[in-house]
Image (tube, grey):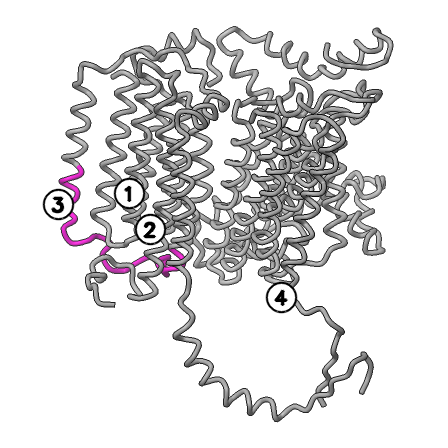
Amino acid sequence: MTPLQGCLLVSALLFAIGLAGAVTRRNAILALVGIELMLNAANLNFIAFWRYGPNPEALSGMMVVIFSIAIAAAEAAAGLALIIAIYRHYRTVNLDEINKLKG
Amino acid sequence: MMLESAVHPAVGTMFDTLDQIFVTLKHEAVGWFPDAWRPFVSALISISFIPLVFTTLFGFVTVIERKGLGRIQNRYGPNRVGIPLTKIRLCGFGQFISDGLKSLTKEDIVPHTADKAVHFLAPVVLLIPVLLAYAVLPIGRNMTAVDFDAGLLFFFAVGGAVELSVFMAGWSSHNKYSLLGAMRAIAQMISYEVPLILSAVTVIMIVGSLRLADIVTAQNHYTYGVAHWFVFTPWGLAGFILFFIASLAESNRSPFDLPEAESEIIAGYFTEYSGFKFALFFLGEYLGMFAISGLGITLFLGGWTAPFSFLAWVPSYLWFFAKLMALVFVFIWIRGTLPRLRMDQLMNFAWKFMLPLSLVNIVTAGVWHFMGHGPLRWVVCPAMIFGSYVILGRGLMQNQKLGKRIYRYAE
Amino acid sequence: MFFNQSTIQRFNNLTVTLPFIIIAVVTLFAAAAAMSLRNLVHCALSLVVALAGLAALYLALDAQFVGFAQILVYVGAVAILIVFAVLLTRSDATPNQTILAPGWFTGIVVSAAVFATLGWAALNSTGLPREMPPAPAATVKDIGDLLMTQYVLPLEVIGLLLTAALIGAVIIAMKEEIPESRSSRRESAPSEKLERTDVRCYETEKGGAP
């Protein structure tokens, strides 16, 4: 197994763990944590391909990952603010009980 | 070598050797090992120097702080413990030995409902990032342990990891006051990180590099015998003051020590820590103070360079430690003098005063750079900074009515 | 990192190295723990370990700036945000009911299938480069140059996005004060009147005893 394949396997496993967690857990916050793990797995993929690719001088992989980190941070902030607002209304963050649109 | 001095060449080379003595010693020591081991040994020697030196410095500074605070409060500080088991007093400088022994032998009490694993790991998680931060500080000429290309970013990254340990300590103690103190401490640290980083951004802009050794080299030339430290420029002075205030807040020192003050919240997030874990927290806090002072010295006060060219023969690491001790003295002085800020006053100060002022400072640094040399920029830039300082200060004072004091007595 | 060139050529050419395996195993264990522990604060702390492990992987792949930015943004900010959200939604106690959502088994099967597909694609593709090219000089200056010339539009858009996210998050999470304060003012007014009549106060301009 070449180092690149090792990185890709790690990133795939990380993505699968994030997906499993986001889908299986009841708490809304853990769904967000799963999404963050998936984003990080994709970032690792980008960096691995950038490093082993034909033209690492162009720094394109690094650029995408920098923007991806910024976007993930913004999305985590907005998502967690939503969860806090929902908690204030429903008094729970259990995803099964947040199933009505009526305010 | 690179020393500019008006001293006789033979004496000059002697001071050159003295300046680089640790570097040559390290090269010699690494040369004794076989070729494959050399990178490891070199790294090991560079980094083992850091805990040894700075922990000893921590010991001395605790005694100096207590004596200094004592003198400010018109009393003697510790002056009994010198060399243990003898009658030699050494003006009380052996106090840290007895304090260390005391904290090692004290009983380690962990609350019954505390989260044992997290409670145990919190001091460790505090110490590791703080010690990591020293790796990028240029302590002398060619004496940076790990010279990253993005060294300043590394420093701020590991500084952000300290907040996690504060949370771990506060939450795992299962104590309302600890949690409250931890939340306040984290809010304070996050708020003051922004002016801290923004005031460092002005230096990065002017130098054009994140490598700390480059930043020191950019300050290493002299005009009319005075060094080109950034603190001697208007934006540098404002930036240094902002950086210093923010570093006071980051290290939870007075006047920003609401999260851990004894009269406020019984030591805050480390209420439930006793014995050696408390000593580790104390150590971590002081080491953090040294690290961030070291960074302030590197960014604004010229790192290891001498202030005047006729003093450039003094070895570079002595200058670094002299400046470090000066900054630590100012920390202690401020602690003994200023009253504590309330939480809302603290947050208002960070977000409404320091953040706009650091943004104005960035613009001023840019204006300074593009105005070219000459007396005009020495007039325009201080005017910009002083003007915005006055406007922000007056603007924020509108809500408070500072009229004559009215006394009310109940009957 | 601080390996010299000959060590790299001896180890890194065609097999995964031991440091890589150690960091990867730690990261994966921490990620699995982050998704499966009962106590949410433990999950958040394991997430921190996973993110730090990823930063170490980025450093091993010569992406210094991204590694440090990962620690600064994720460990220093996003993890603290998650921890604050856990505390503000009172989820920090260990739950006593089940932690799994209904339909959890399907979720696990689907993620296993996703991993199988991605793993098969990674291991069996023929077009992947095998050797590591020489380390690129990814200095911060180059990144800055690129950000200001080729990627200036994404940079400005990210600035706008972050401002919008900041303002939006503050507004969403802010307490709504207006409907509550009217009723509370009506309730507290009579009791305040009672308290005021009990105390007679002197008001003097100067200090000193009355």
Can you identify the residue that label 4 sits on?
Answer: B399
Indicate yes or no whether the magenta region holds residue C88: yes
Q: Which of marks 4 and 2 is in front?
A: 4
Whether discs 4 and 1 lie on one chain: the answer is: no
Q: Which label is found at residue C106?
A: 3
Q: On the image, which quarter does residue B85 sit in?
A: top right
Q: Nearer the viewer, mark 3 or mark 4?
A: 4
Residue B104 in view of the camera: no
Whether C102 is drawn above or below B90: the answer is below
Q: Residues within 10 Å of mark 1 (few under 14, many from 20)?
A: many
The secondary element bearing badge 4 is classed as: loop
Quadrant of the snapshot with the C terminus of chain B = bottom right
Give the chain letter at badge 3: C
Give the Cα distance between marks 2 and 1: 11 Å
Q: Residues within 10 Å of mark 2 (few under 14, many from 20)?
A: some
Find residue A39 and report its horizontal and vertical position in percent. 30, 37
Give the chain letter at badge 4: B
Hey, what amino acid is under mark 1? Ile
Q: In this view, does B188 lie to the left or right of B309?
A: left
Whether C157 is drawn above or below C91: the answer is above
Q: On the image, which quarter does residue B193 sit in?
A: top right
The secondary element bearing badge 3 is classed as: helix
Q: Which of marks 2 and 1 is in front?
A: 2
Give the Cα distance between marks 2 and 3: 25 Å
Q: Which label is found at residue C192?
A: none
Give the chain letter at badge 2: A
Q: Which label is found at residue A35?
A: 1
Hey, what amino acid is under mark 2? Gly
The segment highlighted magenta reads C86-111
Whether B340 is drawn above or below B277: the answer is below
Give the Cα distance between marks 3 and 1: 18 Å
The secondary element bearing badge 1 is classed as: helix
